[in-house]
Amino acid sequence: MVRQVEDAEAVQEALRRRVRADVPGPEAVATVAGFDVAYDTDSDVVAGAVVVLAAPDWTVIASATATGRAAFPYVPGLLSFREMPPLLDAWNNVLPQLTAPPDLLVCDGHGIAHPRRFGLACHLGVTLDLPTIGVAKTPFVGTHTAPGPLRGERTPILLDDEPVGAALRTRDGVREVYLSVGHRTNLDSACRWVLDLCSRYRLPETTRAADHLSRTALAARLRSGSAGDARSAGITDGSR
DNA sequence: GCGACAG
DNA sequence: ATCTTGTCGC
């Protein structure tokens, strides 16, 4: 497993140079995709989910899941190697439902706020070559002070004296979220769109919908035994 | 050397 | 991530 870790870190070092974290973000966002993975710790079964929401009210217009077995352990700093396989499978399942790629991707976890500046959001963004933001529920690396209590207030997350993300208050009085650029956008734009996605709850609608779907898919997969049918193959119908 | 450590 | 009861608040 030591070897597995060293290889993964080498892959990160190689791919990190493709990350674009200081470029203009999407001007307009017609559709945004949310990504999440649910786990069954006993069986090692995982379920990845992708949801696509449409502006301006972020209604779910498409979604898909994919289930499988975790092929990589959870190692802090190497989360993407655990979550990318189910997420890419779910992505491939949702693509046929779309007429155009989403303008923005939002995933659970960090982007460049990462020990090697290459968190899950970077890996996903670089792989799919689309604007991507990482939104995490807890800090990972760097330091920050508490932002003010009102929606929209934010403070920088500093790592080696560099701003790599923001602690952002998405609703008045709630605990902040920790966001960072994944790929092809910048911090201001990322904060702007995350706030737009948080009109009712602390977490973005993308995260909530993807989280719900991944849990549902995992439960369904655990309920209906072995591989072979459409569900265990990961083929799920999109909403509409 | 000793902890901390996204999900 | 996941395991879990009650409880506070809109």
Image (cartoon, coloured by chain):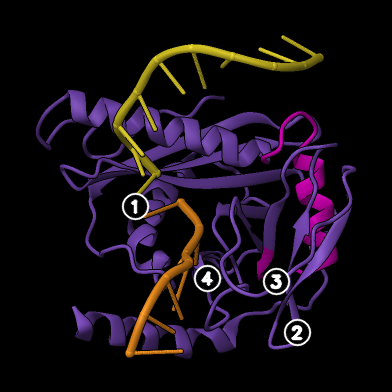
Chain colours: A purple, B orange, C yellow
Q: Amino acid at mark 1?
A: Pro
Circle 4: is it few (<14), some (14-19), or many (20+) Cα within 10 Å?
A: many
- In this image, A21 relative to A47: left or right? right
In the rendered structure, the answer to whether residue A176 lies left or right of residue A122 reads right
Q: Residue at x 85, y 58 (%)?
A: A154
Residue A60 image point, x, y percent: 61, 29
Q: Chain of mark 4?
A: A
Vertical position of residue A232 compared to residue A162: above or below = above
Does the segment drawn in magenta span residue A197?
yes
Disc ID at residue A184: 3
Q: Is residue A59 above or below residue A204?
A: above
Pointers 2 and 3 within a single chain: yes
Q: Chain of mark 2?
A: A
Residue under label 2: A162
Labels 3 and 1: the sequence-earlier one? 1
Q: Nearer the N terminus, badge 3 or badge 4?
A: 4
Residue at the spot of label 4: A119
Secondary element under disc 4, as helix, strand or loop, is loop
Q: CA distance from mark 3 to mark 4?
A: 14 Å
